[in-house]
Amino acid sequence: MLGELREKARARLDPVHWDYFEGGAGAETALAENLRAFARLALLPRVLRGAGPPDLAVRLPGAPAAGPVFVAPTAFHTLAHPEGERATARAAAAADAVMVTSMAATTAVADVAAAAREVRADAAVWFQMYLQPRAGVTEALVRRAEQAGCTALVVTADSPVFGRHSRDDRNDFHRLPPGHVTQNMLGLPGAPPGRPLDIAMSPELSWADLRRLRAATGLPVWVKGVLHPADARLAADEGAAGVIVSNHGGRQLDAVPAAVEALPAVAEAVGGRIPVLLDGGVRSGADVVAALALGAAAVGVGRPVLWGLAASGEAGVAQVLAELTGQARHVLTLCGARDCRDLTPDQVVPRGPEG
Ligand code: FNR
């Protein structure tokens, strides 16, 4: 089913935008590895545990009752569908999925959150941001997210510079076409009147900047893009609400391992002090369950949501989330699990070199 939506999306999208959504950095090795790493994993079910139907609810800082699959932050949803992030947010809210809306969204965070709340008053919308080096910009974005009613912030830390996407270079896709605007970047300190401020990446950011952000908000702050266990430990020491193990869907450093390969060491380093989430390459309920067993509290999906959105708007995103959650429920039942935490790392074993 996801494969069908993907093909429908490919047929509908401008090929340049398809390449933007699908592509990765460099030779796209990390992108491919995210999928191959899941294919190399097998699950060892437990039997006769009398577990009953599994409870799928997970509790996270900023989302007291959500499903185990969340919408990872991705930019430019209006390129996929005219209703853009509003459609994604409505589908996520209906599915009890946390929606992480990107700072580079083509819909303002207030409108994304309002769309989600039309569906469910307590829908969880989180705001993803890159800390901005220009004075006052980060603070202004935080205020917008707070005023919109976001329940957590996600700081993406794996982007000291922009990733180099070979497909976008080949297609010369480096700015949004007319009619699409990064709405969150309008009206910020230093923004040209009526035009968005360019999003800046800075290699000078440090844990001190995260500390400043934490001091400026009462919202839980997640750190996204953690792969090294030592960074996960630091994030916990620094009071992060949790970490998101991610290689940015293979769009930043191409030399990194698959996200799911980095997960066990991160989970071990954190030792339950803060929750660990994962995104990258999740395409089935078995992938969801493998990540949960290896220590993730919930898993994010990026491209599959964009496929659903491009294929049929809100209904397409709803289909993607329902499919993954439904499969996860079935696989959890087959594994004898009572809930998303009732799994252990020894229930994941390698399939062998050729998968
Ligand atoms: C992303 N991702 C991303 N991450 C982030 O923190 N801020 C962003 O604005 C974006 N934008 C973005 C655009 C597109 C087109 C893609 C595909 C990805 C990364 C995203 O949050 C997530 O880490 C990956 O997409 C997860 O991998 P899968 O599910 O796409 O394999």
Image: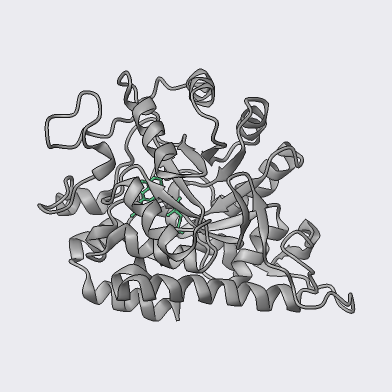
Which residue is at a point 64% across and 46% down the rendered structure image? 276
Residue situated in front as seen by the camera: 299 or 83: 83
Q: Is residue 245 above or below residue 129?
A: below
Residue 15 is situated, as x and y percent measured from the top left of the image, at: 19, 66
- Quadrant of the rendered image containing residue 158: top left
Quadrant into which the N terminus falls: bottom left
Residue 115 is situated, as x and y percent measured from the top left of the image, at: 37, 59
Residue situated in front as seen by the camera: 63 or 154: 63
Q: Is residue 43 above or below residue 141?
A: below
Residue situated in front as seen by the camera: 157 or 134: 134
- Quadrant of the rendered image containing residue 87: bottom left
Horizontal side of residue 53 vs 139, given as left or right: right
- Quadrant of the rendered image containing residue 203: top left
Numbered marks: total: 0
Horizontal side of residue 126 vs 334, given as left or right: left
Q: Is residue 120 above or below residue 172?
A: below
Quadrant into which the C terminus falls: bottom right
What colour scheme governs how the chains and residues are painted in the rendered image of this protein?
Answer: one colour
Residue 307 is situated, as x and y percent measured from the top left of the image, at: 35, 69
Please indicate, yes or no, whether residue 190 appears anywhere in the rendered image: yes
Residue 193 is situated, as x and y percent measured from the top left of the image, at: 11, 31
Which residue is at a point 38% across and 26% down the rendered structure image? 139
Horizontal side of residue 212 vs 109, given as left or right: right
Please indicate, yes or no, whether residue 351 appears anywhere in the rendered image: no
Residue situated in front as seen by the camera: 218 or 4: 218
Which residue is at a point 40% across and 64% down the rendered structure image? 90
Horizontal side of residue 347 vs 85, given as left or right: right
